[in-house]
Image: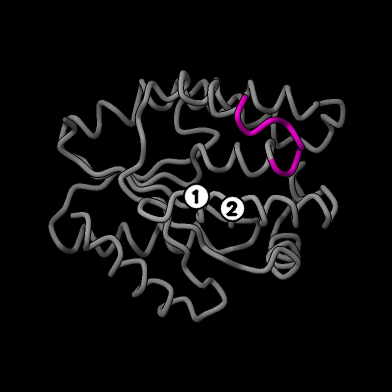
Amino acid sequence: MPKGKFITFEGSEGCGKSTQIKLLSEALIKQGRSVLTTREPGGTDVGEKIREILMDPSHVELTDLTEVFLYEAARTQLVNEIIVPSLDSGHNVLCDRFSESTLAYQGYGGKISVEWIQKIDQMARGGLSPDLTLFIDVDPEVGLKRARASAKEIDRLEEKDLEYHKRVYQGYLELAKKNPDRIKVVDGSKGVQEVHKEILDLVKRIL
């Protein structure tokens, strides 16, 4: 059994995941806990190269199915190279996106069979599941405006239309409803510190 806890952050574009991961990491470190923060796609040399392909807005020819395979390839590398060894060493791992992102974006958003993606994903992560998944709930229209306003360059996902992002959002809600013990919905429309406090309370329950 891993010694550390695995916590993932999920949500639509502009929901504030990066800010909340940073705040949680700082809070846990202050408590004397060992923390490793990573992201998907990315976190490894291989994963970061895959991220460049996936996020590059010039790659308009990429299909949703191609995206699935690329995301799962990056996930396999991250799980085996970084996450599992870190958990086994006693580090608590915080990850910006994980399996639910692929299910929500390429499954619900891209209209690829969620059941099929789950089979591929099970292989990619080698059965590893987060101890806690935090879905930061922000209206997709609000989040998309935030993301586009703050980005230096709009990436491929941010370029997709609002209807796509609404499907992604509904997918997240459905996944949370199906997995209430692991996926906790946090109201991202509240102030940054309010959201942080709610997340901290949820994390305390599993540590």
Q: Which residue is mark 1?
A: 178
Q: Nearer the viewer, residue 183 or 125?
A: 183
Q: Residues within 10 Å of mark 1 (few under 14, many from 20)?
A: few
Location of residue 139 (image quadrant): bottom right
Which amino acid is tagged 1?
A: Lys
Q: CA distance from mark 2 to mark 1?
A: 6 Å
Q: Position of residue 152 (x, y in %)?
A: 72, 55
Nearer-the-camera pick, 64 or 96:
64
Above-or-below relation of 143 to 111: below
Q: Is residue 71 left or right of residue 9?
A: right
Rendered view: 24 above or below 194:
above
Query: For residue 144, which quarter of the picture?
Result: bottom right
Question: Could you say where residue 187 lies in the image, as x and y percent from the top left?
Answer: 51, 72
Q: Residue placed at 60% from the left, 29% from the top?
A: 115
Number of callouts = 2
Q: Of residues 61 and 125, which is closer to you in this image?
A: 125
Which structural element holds mark 1? helix
Query: Residues at badges 2 and 1 in contact (C-beta under 8 Å)?
Result: yes
User: Crowdedness of circle 2 by 10 Å Cα count: few (<14), some, many (20+)?
Assistant: few
Q: Quadrant of residue 67?
A: top right
Query: Which residues are drawn in magenta?
Result: 108-116
Is residue 48 within the magenta segment?
Answer: no
Dot 2 corresponds to which residue?
174
Q: What SS does tag 2 mark?
A: helix
Q: Position of residue 118 (x, y in %)?
A: 54, 29
Question: Vertically, is 132 above or below 44?
Answer: below
- Residue 200's x, y, as percent? 30, 67
